[in-house]
Structures are given as structure tokens and as C-alpha cells.
Image (tube, grey):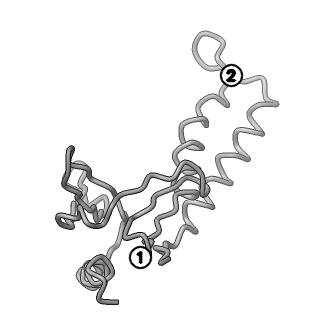
Amino acid sequence: MMHLKEHKTFQIIMLILFLISAFYFSFSEVKIANDIPIWVVCILPVSVYTYQVSRKVDFDMAAQRLEVSFFGFFPQKYNLKNFERLIIINHKMNFINNGKEVKIIFKGDQTKEVSLLRKHKFKGIEDFIKETQKIIQGDF
């Protein structure tokens, strides 16, 4: 089994920051509109960063499949025999670069797009794609 290694330092720091903020705001008396406590604002960022930190991508070469899981639970399995292609998506917001994402597309009954990796600065993207294709084709 080959694990896709990601550097998640920034996501971990942000998750800790928002968890501390939510804990701190839960003791404060500050309210936003309609008497909603201010710590509620932290729920979405905590959820997003928890997902990013806990997401795990593995290539199971013995079973010829890609596994994407959350904390190792709820694995989604995709057969590598249905591999169609890899695509690169450039994310922009207001004409400002917001990162690049590599997705793998599987054909079959329904076309599936699975995100492999997303980074703000992605320098070796061509090397990453070549290596991923070698893994999928079994030439590792």
C-alpha cells in the first residue's frame, strides 16, 4: 500500500487556532445577531480543517484500487482499472491564484472525480503526475 504524503502543518495550526478560539468564545458573553453565541462562527472552519487534516489517500496495489478515507474510517474505494486520466485544476479568485489541484477521473457507470492533492504552491506538479501515472499503471 502506498500512502500519498501531504504536508499539513498549516492546516493543523489553523485547526488548533480555531479550536482555541471556539473554546475561548464559548466562555465569553459576546453574541452576534439574534442572540447567537460568537463561537458558532468557528464551526465551519473547524469542520473544514478537520477534514483536511484527517483525509488520507492510499493506493492499494495488491487490490488495484485507490482508497480515500476520513481518519481511516468511511473508506471510499475506487478501482484503478477504471482510471481514465489525471487533470490539473488552477483555482483562482478575483484573478488571484488560489492554488492547484490534481484530480483523478474514473470512468464506469458514473464518471467520478476524486481529488488527490491540492496545494497553494505546487512546484513539482509534472513530476507528481508522472509518478502517480506510474503507480496506477503498475510501473513502480
Q: Residue furthest right?
A: 27
Amino acid type, mark 2: Pro
Marker disc for residue 37: 2
Q: Left or right: 113 with respect to 18?
A: left
Q: Left or right: 118 with respect to 85?
A: right
Q: Residue at x 61, y 55 (%)?
A: 71
Q: Residue at x 23, y 57 (%)?
A: 106
Nearest the eye: 89 or 138: 138
Task: Where is residue 104? Give x, y as percent.
Answer: 26, 62
Q: Secondary structure at mark 1?
A: loop
Q: Residue at x 61, y 37 (%)?
A: 42
Task: Where is residue 57? Give x, y as percent.
Answer: 46, 65
Indicate whether 98 appears above or below 1. Answer: above
Q: Left or right: 53 with respect to 133?
A: right
Nearest the eye: 5 or 105: 105
Q: Quadrant of the C terminus?
A: bottom left
Indicate whether 67 appears above or below 46. Answer: below
Q: Secondary structure at mark 2?
A: strand
The residue at which mark 1 appears reads as 61
Q: How far is the residue under mark 2 from the one under mark 1?
A: 49 Å
Q: CB of mark 2 within 8 Å of CB of mark 1?
A: no
Amino acid type, mark 1: Met
Nearest the eye: 133 or 122: 133
Residue 136 figure quarter:
bottom left
Sequence order check, earlier mark of 2 and 1: 2
Indicate whether 42 appears above or below 65. Answer: above
